[in-house]
Amino acid sequence: MVIIVAIVLIAKGYAYFSKKYFTKYYYNLGHSSRFTIILIIIVFGYWIVRNIPVAPFHHLAP
């Protein structure tokens, strides 16, 4: 979960600084509906997989 937050923050920061300091604006992924749907699928997929009581998945549970 922390990795996903870090990726989103890096993407937002990159879009912000590219808009502020460069003449060419790089598209912000956070404004894409596809990015939002993929992020929701990853979060819900992790939430479901970590509750499966099988050997590799129970290590994901807190």
Image (tube, rainbow, N blue to C red):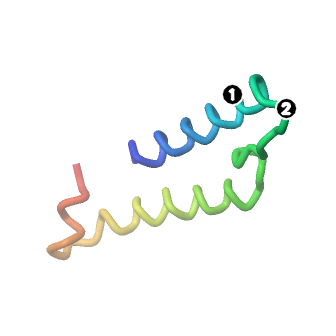
Q: Residue furthest front?
A: 23
47 vs 9: above or below: below
Report which quarter residue 40 is drawn in: bottom right
Q: Residue furthest bottom?
A: 54
Which residue is located at x 24 percent, y 55 percent? Answer: 61
Which residue is located at x 70 percent, y 36 percent? Answer: 15
Q: Residue 7 vs residue 51: left or right?
A: right
Residue 26, image x, y percentages: 77, 43
**Label 2 is placed on what type of residue?**
Thr
Q: Residue 25 vs residue 34: left or right?
A: right
Q: Residues within 10 Å of mark 1 (few under 14, many from 20)?
A: few
21 vs 41: above or below: above
Q: Residue furthest left?
A: 55
Residue 18, image x, y percentages: 72, 32
Q: Residue 3 vs residue 16: left or right?
A: left
Residue 45, image x, y percentages: 46, 66
Between marks 2 and 1, how big is the CA–CA gap? 11 Å
Which residue is located at x 75 percent, y 24 percent? Answer: 21
Disc 1 is placed on an element classified as helix
Which residue was labeled with disc 1? Answer: 17
Of pointers 2 and 1, the one earlier in the residue sequence: 1
Which residue is located at x 41 percent, y 47 percent? Answer: 3
**Label 1 is placed on what type of residue?**
Phe
Q: Residues within 10 Å of mark 2 (few under 14, many from 20)?
A: few
Which residue was labeled with disc 2? Answer: 23
Marker count (numbered) = 2
54 vs 15: above or below: below
User: Closest to the observer: 54 or 6?
Assistant: 6
User: Closest to the observer: 14 or 2?
Assistant: 14
